[in-house]
Amino acid sequence: MENSMIVVGGFSFLWCGLYFGLCFMKPSRSNEWHCRTVTAVHAIVVCLLSLWCAFVQGPWPFTDAGGPSTPLQSLTIMICLGYFIFDLSWCLYFQTEGLPMLFHHLCSILGMTVGTVTGQYGTEMIATIFGSEITNPILQFRWFLREEGKYNSVLGEIVDASFMFLFGFFRIGIGSYLLYSYFKQDTDFLGRLGAVVIYGISWMFWINIVTYAIKKHKRTRKHEKMHKKQDSKNNVSLSNGEPHSCISNGRKSVETQSSINGSITNKDQFHIQRFINYKYSNN
């Protein structure tokens, strides 16, 4: 137990070192930028390790959960636990996250600590880590796009759609089947309790994601209707010969000048010319 927690502390120190190294190398970037970079690196590392544990080494979580952890499973869990300790400390220090995310971090730390101390639940935890972290790189990439001002683009729409699909597929679809199969296997109360809590948190996040997607769709439709309405008004104004107010760089556009000149009659031009001739003849 003591050796395991020392290893966890070492991995937590490693993630902290990566974060401070990024801060030192690129001080122009924000602290959150560097923290999210660490988050993306962690997600990629533990997802690759989880894939190897589940598909190459085994055991298979849908049929053989509830047994002792393999050495590679224990190592993956300790790497993940060290990261979560770092990330929770960062969130508390900078106060960037709300209660749902803090609750998620605390439950994850508690569950992985139990798995590390007891040496059990490795198979089901590996499956949970993979399902939870597979969408994390996409989530961080979405945030980077927003910071760079490139989110409102086709790429941003693709990233949003990919994140929503993968989250629903793995954490809700596969997660539901995994929870069902977990209860069908010879597993204990503590493991089932942890599975239900993590599954419930996934649903909480999923509802927030769907709600955001609906609001975003309504907002986009509203903006499109406003633009169409404005375009139709401009077209009506131009067809009636009215000036189209179009300002560019502090000057009236050529379109505005031409519409104004088109509204001056020949009689008006005659009087203007008489005024000019009168003024200069008196000078």
Image (tube, grey):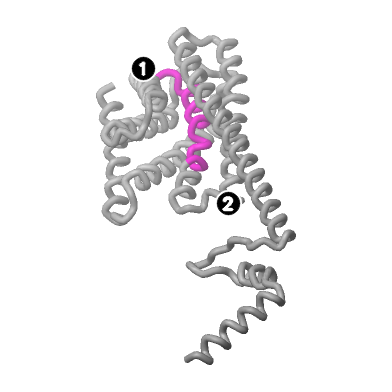
Relative image position of residue 163 (x, y in whole percent): 56, 38
Q: Nearer the viewer, mark 2 or mark 1?
A: 2
Is residue 186 visible to us here? yes
- Residue 115 drawn at (x, y percent): 39, 20
CA gap, disc 2 and disc 1 = 48 Å
Q: Residues within 10 Å of mark 1 (few under 14, many from 20)?
A: few
Q: In the rendered image, which residue does mark 1 sit on?
A: 118
Nearest the viewer among 8 and 247 is 247
Q: Which mark is residue 153?
A: 2
Q: Main secondary structure of the magenta part?
A: helix
SS for callout 1: helix
Most distant residue in the top direction: 189
Q: Secondary structure at mark 2?
A: loop
Q: Residue at x 52, y 36 (%)?
A: 134
Which disc, if any, is residue 22? Answer: none
Q: Which residues are magenta?
A: 119-139
Q: Give the residue type at disc 2.
A: Ser
Is 145 positioned to the left or the right of 79 in the image?
Answer: right
Can you say whether 65 is above or below 163 in the image?
A: above
Using the rendered image of the protein, determine whether residue 112 is visible from the camera's viewpoint. Answer: no
Q: Residues within 10 Å of mark 2 (few under 14, many from 20)?
A: few
- Position of the N terminus by quadrant: top left
Q: Is residue 125 magenta?
A: yes
Q: First in sequence: mark 2 or mark 1? A: 1
**How many marks are shown on the rendered structure?**
2
Front residue (pair 116, 28):
28
- Tag 1: amino acid: Thr
